[in-house]
Image (cartoon, rainbow, N blue to C red):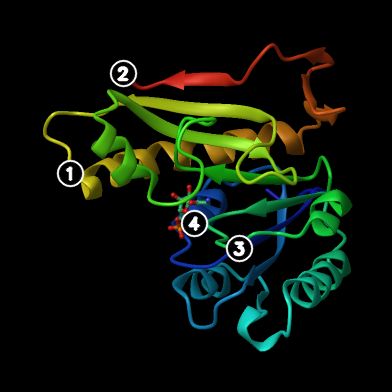
Amino acid sequence: MSTDYRIVVLLSGSGTTLQSIIDAKLPANIVAVISNKPNVRGLSRAQEAGIPAHVLDHTTFPSRQDFDLELQTLIDQQRPDLVVLAGFMRILSDDFVHHYYGRLINIHPSLLPKYKGTHTHQRVMDDGDPLHGSSVHFVNTELDSGPILLQARLPVLATDSVESLELRVKVKEHLIYPTAISWLAKGRIKLKDDAIYMDGKKMPGPVVMDYM
Ligand code: GAR
């Protein structure tokens, strides 16, 4: 379905998250995909779906600020309602984050606020944590710390390896991210003073989808 709601997706890698958003046939238009790395699978997935794909190689910029400014210019040319980070493995500068306040979301593979940063699956296993999952959150200037909209929660199995755990988390990510984006596209979600409102009511905490 194609509507007036415009999404720009930023990624750095294989793009399975992008693929889940494409496949969900949301009431939204993915108007551009931008990668900070050339030749990644996420770019060819966009092209296969007929979505304009852009590369902005961060290694060719003298500083983070220069890269972020150019990225912002490219994004704003697309006039997006929502900017979706889908495996975009770059820290964004404060100015960039402020510019997109309330319309910049991320998916992070942990039950935030636990396991911010990288190697989340390995760290969950190392800690013997019985639970793991993924979180869809608005982006603020602190790493992996913005208001959380939706989480998928699942058990860590005795038989899990880091790879199997990552795969099981990803399967759930591919359900919750399109769900969260569809809520936003339908205008059901608003962010105000770092509080999330759903259907006009302040949310007491994230919606949690349990896959126990
Ligand atoms: C996803 O698991 C996503 O949660 C994670 O990267 C993966 C992207 O997969 N994001 C982060 O770690 C952000 N901090 P993909 O490249 O196959 O879409």
**Whether label 4 touches label 1, CB < 8 Å:** no
Residue at 30 percent across and 39 percent down: it is 168
**Residue type at numbered disc 4:** Gln
User: Mark 1 highlights which residue?
Assistant: 161
Q: Disc 2 versus disc 4: distance between alpha carbons? A: 25 Å
140 with respect to 25 (left or right): right
**Any atom of ligand 1 within 8 Å of the CB at mark 4?**
yes
Any mark on residue 19, and which?
4
**Residue under numbered circle 3:** 90
- Asked if disc 3 is less than 8 Å from ligand 1, the answer is no
Is label 3 in contact with label 4 (beta carbons under 8 Å)?
A: no
Between circles 2 and 3, the one closer to the viewer is 3
Write down the residue under mark 2.
212
Q: Using the image as rendered, state which of residue 48 and residue 168 is in the foreground.
A: 168
User: Which circle's residue, 2 or 3, is located before the other in the chain?
Assistant: 3
15 up-or-down from 148: above or below = below
Three-letter amino acid code at disc 1? Ser
Residue 91, percent from left and from top: 64, 59
Image quadrant in which the C terminus is located: top left
Location of residue 161 by image quarter: top left
Q: Which residue is depicted at the point 60% across and 42% down? A: 144
Q: Which of the two labelled residues, at mark 2 and mark 1, occupies the earlier sequence position? A: 1
Element under disc 1: loop
- Lower sequence index among marks 4 and 1: 4
At label 4, counting other C-alpha atoms closer than 10 Å, the crowd grade (few under 14, some 14-19, many 20 or more) is some
Q: How many angstroms separate mark 1 from mark 3 (CA)?
A: 27 Å
Three-letter amino acid code at the position of disc 2: Met
